[in-house]
Amino acid sequence: VASIIVHGGAGAYDPGEAHRAVLAAAVHAGWKILDAGGTALDAVESAVVVMEDDPTFNAGLGSSLNLSGFVEADASVMTSDLSCGAVAGVTAAANPIRAARLVMERTDHVLLAGAGADEFVRRMGLPSRDLRTERRLALYEKNLAKLRAGEEIRFMPHLRGVAEELGFGTVGAVAVDGEGHIAAATSTGGLMMKLPGRVGDAAVIGAGTYANAFGGVSVTGHGEPIMRHLLAKAAADVIGDVGVREAIESVLELGRARGIGFGMIGAEENGAVGYGYTTQGMSWAYVRDGELRTFLDGA
Ligand code: ASP
């Protein structure tokens, strides 16, 4: 059974109906491809592109700004045959997920970062744009004033409780197609006010994104602990044994025990989907058997 699930980030407040509408549009874009017999890879890419193109999400246009006021976006994609690709710190790609896919398909590498990743985006002829929005610039100025008022300027001092401060907006998708192939994808501008050069979990295979023959996972939340514990791989590793829901539940347990603020979505070969979070909330939507469910409907 084909299925697709998407998330719009983990966070601490209600993201509301407008956010839900974009998630629904994204999951529909992916589902249309699956329904027409298309691949899981095409489905997750198109779902993520819809959210990257929407300025209210922290991915593509509308990405978070780093401490210098610039975008450094991370994205990754992986399929059930263990093919994978990622970009880190891309500054202007309209759709970082498309760059990640091209790293997977057109290079001998897994991860391109920084200036080389930007150069790759240009070389591949992918569209670029200024990803900064007025809303993000205003938030940046506000945060900068807060930082300046503080005694020490150190790495994200305003994020003592990162989980509490997380805003929704990172995006991800996991799909299973009619052939039983699985794909997972994640894209983000990363944490607001991060140090320039900081790479988060969304660029790291095994941390923000993972897929194998049994299932796929996309993670959102506080990137540093997600990387330390390779949460996407931790969940994917047990999907084959216990199914996607229990796999996610076991990782949530670990995350709660260690105080990690995060959320994840996943799907398994038979089309079952799952989601969960340790934060106050996470937005999600899925289509299974042609039927749409979203976080505002409840499970
Ligand atoms: N995981 C992302 C990061 O740490 C942020 C997020 O998911 O909201 O870069």
Image (tube, rainbow, N blue to C red):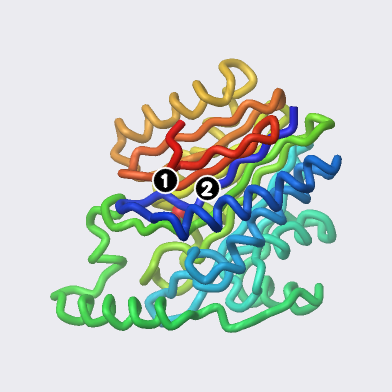
* Quadrant position of residue 237: top right
Residue 187 seen in the current view: yes
What secondary structure is found at the residue carrying circle 1?
A: strand
Q: Is residue 158 above or below residue 67?
A: above
Number of numbered callouts drawn: 2
Q: Residues within 10 Å of mark 1 (few under 14, many from 20)?
A: many
Vertical arrangement, residue 99 with respect to residue 16, above or below: below
Judged from the image, the quadrant occupied by ligand 1 is: bottom left
Name the residue that disc number 2 marks: 7
- Asked which secondary structure carries label 2, the reply is strand
Which residue is disc 1 drawn over? 282
Work out whether mark 1 precedes mark 2 in sequence or the reverse, and give the earlier one. Answer: 2
Residue 11: image location, x then y, percent: 36, 52
Between 175 and 192, the residue placed more toward the observer is 175
> Is the residue at mark 2 in contact range of ligand 1, meaning its CB lies under 8 Å from it?
no
285 sits left or right of 27 in the view: left
Q: Which mark is residue 188?
A: none
Amino acid at dot 2? His
Q: Residue at x 70, y 45 (%)?
A: 78
Instruction: Name the residue nearer the viewer: 46 or 235.
Output: 46
Give the quarter of the figure containing the N terminus. Answer: top right
Residue at the image point whose x is 69% and y is 49% from the top = 44
Residue at 71 percent of width and 56 percent of height? 46
- Please tell me whether residue 5 is drawn above or below residue 26 in the rendered image: above
